[in-house]
Image: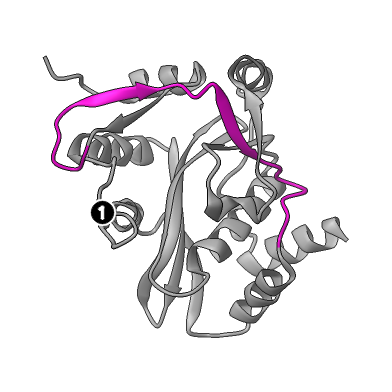
Amino acid sequence: MQLVLTSELLLQAYAMGLFPMAYSAGSPFIHWVCPEMRGQLSIPDMHIPRSLKKAVRQSLKKPSIEIKIDTAFEDVILGCAEVKDDRPETWINDQILDAFINLHEEGHAHSVEYWEDGELMGGLYGLRLGSVFCGESMFSRTANASKIALVHLAARLWKGGFQVLDTQFINDHLEQFGIYEVPHKEYLSIIKSVKDIKADFYLEGFSEKKILDEYFAMRG
C-alpha cells in the first residue's frame, strides 16, 4: 500500500526529526530518513566567503537580477530535481513534489528564488516548523545562484526571528558556510524548545536589500 504524504503526516514527521526521500524520481516508494547526526547552519553566524559576499552585494546593484520569495515554488522543486552529470538521480518523485506543493499552499513551505533577465536561474526550498526552517534542496543554472539564495535565506530567517536552519546532512557544497552536526537526540531537544516560537518568513514591507543590509550590519 502506497504511503500518502499528507501535510499533517509530514509536519508530525519533521517534528520528530524524520523526512521522506524517494528511491528515485520514477519510484512510487518513499522511505523515512533519520540521520544520527544532523547538519546545521548558524543563522546569525553562517560563514560567508568574502568573494560570495561581494557577489551578493553586486547582484543587488544589477537590475537584471532579482531575489524573489514564493513566486515559483513548484518550479524551484523541479529545478532541484533536474538530472545532471554530477547528479544522475534524484530523491524527489511526484508524490514528494505534490506533498510539498500542498505544504506551500498551506503556508508551511517556502522558496527563495534567484531570477536573472526574467528567468529562474536558481534557488532553494524548505519546510518551516515555527521558528525552525528545514532546508530541503537547492539548485543553480548559473554561477553562485543557489549560494546567493542561501545568503538571502539566512538574512530573512535572522530578521524574521527563526532559531534553527536545518540542512539534514553535511555535504561539500555547504562546508564553506560553516556547517556543523548535532546528534539526533540533541536536534530533537532543540527543535522541541523552539518549534512553537512564532517567526515571520514573509517580512512584508521589507525589501531584500534592507533585510540583507541589516543582516550584514549585525554581523559587523
Q: Position of residue 72 (x, y in %)?
A: 34, 58
Looking at the rendering, in which quadrant would you find the C terminus? bottom right
Hey, which quadrant is residue 25 in on the image? top left
Which residue is labeled 1 in the image? 88
**Measured along the vertical axis of the image, is residue 199 above or below residue 188?**
below
Residue 44, horizontal then vertical, whole percent: 76, 47
Callout 1: helix, strand or loop? loop
Q: Is residue 75 visible?
A: yes
**Overall secondary structure of the magenta stretch?**
loop
Q: Is residue 70 left or right of residue 77?
A: right
Q: Amino acid at mark 1?
A: Pro
Instruction: Write the residue at 55% across / 49% down.
Output: 202
- Number of numbered discs: 1
Who's the residue at 20% across and 19% down the image? 3
Q: Residue at x 26, y 54 (%)?
A: 88
Q: In the image, residue 204 lies at what x, y percent?
A: 59, 54
In this picture, is 217 found above or below 41?
A: below
Q: Dot 1, crowdedness within 10 Å: few (<14), some or many (≥20)?
A: few
The way the protein has been coloured in the rendering is one colour
Which quadrant of the view contains residue 214? bottom right
Seen as rendered, the residue at the extreme right is 220
Residue 217 part of the magenta segment: no
Range shown magenta: 24-48
Does the rendering let one see residue 196?
no
Please report the residue visible at 48 percent of the width from the left and 84 percent of the height from the top: 64
How far across and how far down the image is residue 46, in percent?
72, 50
Quadrant containing the N terminus is top left
Image quadrant in which you'd find residue 141:
bottom left
Q: Quick one: 164 or 102, which is closer to the camera?
A: 164
